[in-house]
Each structure stands twice: as C-alpha cells, then as structure tokens.
Image (spheres, helix red, strand yellow):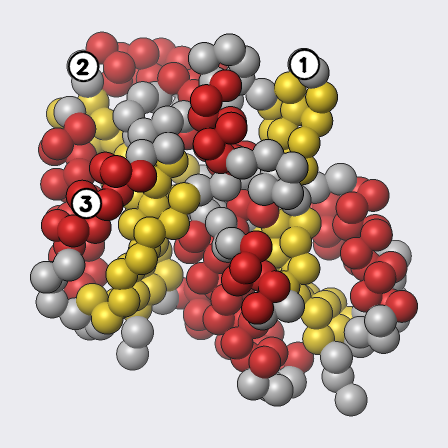
C-alpha cells in the first residue's frame, strides 16, 4: 500500500490553509536580515518584507538542510512510502538540487523531485493539482507521469513597478536595468524552457504594461477555457482593479488573487503585478 507525501517550497505561494487542506508539507525558504533569519511565510509576512525594504533589503536562501531532514525523518516515522517534491525553478534557486540530494540519504522513501522551471502561483498550481491526484488515490507511478502534462498547461507573466530589486539581486544586468529605468520601460517577464527569466516584451509605463498583460491573457483565452490568478506583490488595490477589468473576458472559468511569497517579494520589490494561467481542457 502506497502512502504518498507531497513537499513544496514556499515560493509556490500557496496559503497555509490550502497546504493544510491538502496535507502538503512546506519547506520554507529563508530570509536573512542583519538582525536575524526568518522562515519564509511561517515567521515573516510579505507585508513585513515590503514595509522594511526602504531600511534593508534582506538576502534569501534555499530551505535549510536541517528543515528538509526533519521533514523526511518525520515522513519515515509516519510510514510514508513515497515522496513527491514540487520545486521552484532550478534556474533560479538551488532548492531542487538540495532536496534531491538529501532524499538520496533516505532510500526507504521512493521519491520524485519535479523541477517546475517556474515560480510563484504557477508552481503552486502544479502542487495543487498533484495534491488532488494523491487525494483521489492515484498511484505514485500514475501521478509522476501526469505532473509534466499538468505543468505544460500552466504559464506565468509579471511586470514590476521598479527594476531596482532585480538589479540588486543580480537577476538582471545593472546596465540594462538602469537603461530600462531611465526610459521608464516595464518589461513583461516570464521564464524560458530552462527556467530563467526573460522579457516577452517591453512597455512604456505602468498603464501600458498592464495592457500588455491583458493582451497576453486574451491570446491564451483564445486557445480555450482557463483558470486565472492575478498575482501581486504589495499592490493589492491595484490587483483588485486589474482583476475587475478581466472579469468579463470570455473563457475565464475561475478568477482569483494571489500575493507572492515574502522571499519572492525581496527580489521583485513592491508593485509587482502578474498572471498565472492554467489551460483547462
């Protein structure tokens, strides 16, 4: 009899309530200030991170080996036989590799570590759909074949109010970032097949960047029905207005708001707006 556990890192943006409902085990990323270190989501909120960015931009790091080991040891004690881990893109974080290596020391657990090559709610959607398959009683072998298919139907895009934090975090070049700031360019960012950030297009100013996001969503909706999440980082009111503007678009079957995790907020800065889109057959 298989007993399957599901692990996610905190970059997935699922709420603690959702993780509890689906029995998803959380591996928190870490946020480090000069005054101390915090576990993402569990010990610090996104709002707290944003409110302190003008004083200090913290550093982020992958879940600690101790946290991962503790969960794996607990799973063995609770007689789990299989583990599925859904992770942030390996092109953006060492989390995937760390979990994979530590699982090698737990041969009693048959494991599958899936690199989503994405982050934020798009990663969370993969985890949620996987959790539903576990809840349905599907076998480990069936589920790991299904996960890449689930992932292939999910996309994510975002734009930023400022490029400062991506520059500081080394996620984009300083020169190109400064030129973009000077020209008030707002790139629409996604990830490529290797899970690395790239710009789909650029817009001049905030209004145009939101319009570009809407156009991208409309193109996706032309392919068929979609579930849509409006993503935001410290921009709830703006996200609500954006969501309101999308309500009457054809083929949206579900529309929600999701705030990005504290750790992701460090690199995005306040004012992120984005979309997570799941194609539904």
Left or right: where 84 falls relative to 22: right
Can you say whether 265 is above or below 85 in the image?
above
Image quadrant in which you'd find residue 33 = top right
Measure the C-alpha gap from mark 3 to mark 1. Answer: 36 Å
Circle nearer the viewer, 2 or 3: 3
Q: Which one is in front, 15 or 201?
A: 15
Rendered position, 76 above or below 53: below
**Could you say where residue 248 lies in the image, as x and y percent from the top left?**
10, 61
Image quarter of the C terminus: bottom left
Q: Quadrant of residue 240?
A: top left
Residue annotated with mark 1: 34
Establish if 223 lies above or below 215.
below
Mark 2 = which residue?
Answer: 183
Whether residue 166 is visible to the viewer of this picture, yes or no, is: no
Residues at marks 1 and 2, CA–CA distance in whole angstroms: 34 Å
On the image, numbered disc 3 is attached to which residue? 242
* Residue shown at the point (31%, 11%) measured from the top left: 178
How far from the left and from the top, in percent, is residue 213? 20, 44
């Amino acid at each position: 009899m298989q007993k399957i556990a599901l692990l996610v890192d905190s970059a997935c943006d699922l709420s603690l309530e959702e993780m509890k409902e689906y029995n998803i085990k959380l591996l928190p990323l870490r946020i480090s200030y000069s005054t101390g270190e915090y576990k993402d989501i569990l010990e610090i909120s996104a709002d707290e991170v944003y409110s302190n960015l003008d004083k200090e931009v913290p550093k982020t790091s992958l879940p600690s080996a101790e946290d991962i080991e503790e969960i794996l040891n607990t799973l063995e004690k609770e007689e789990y036989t299989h583990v599925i881990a859904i992770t942030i893109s390996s092109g953006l974080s060492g989390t995937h590799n760390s979990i994979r290596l530590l699982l090698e020391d737990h041969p009693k657990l048959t494991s599958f570590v899936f690199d989503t090559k994405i982050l934020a709610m798009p990663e969370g959607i993969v985890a949620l759909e996987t959790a539903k398959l576990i809840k349905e009683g599907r076998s480990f072998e069936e589920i790991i074949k299904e996960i890449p298919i689930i992932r292939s139907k999910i996309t994510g895009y975002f734009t930023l109010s400022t490029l400062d934090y991506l520059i500081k975090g080394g996620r984009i070049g300083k020169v190109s970032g400064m030129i973009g700031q000077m020209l008030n360019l707002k790139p629409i960012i996604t990830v490529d097949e290797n899970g690395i950030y790239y710009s789909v297009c650029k817009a001049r100013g905030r209004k145009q960047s939101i319009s570009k996001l809407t156009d991208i969503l409309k193109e996706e909706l032309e392919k068929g029905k979609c579930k849509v999440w409006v993503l935001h980082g410290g921009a709830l009111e703006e996200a609500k207005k954006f969501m309101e503007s999308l309500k009457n678009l054809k083929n949206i079957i579900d529309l929600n708001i999701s705030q990005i995790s504290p750790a992701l907020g460090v690199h995005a800065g306040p004012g992120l707006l984005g979309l997570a889109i799941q194609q539904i057959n």
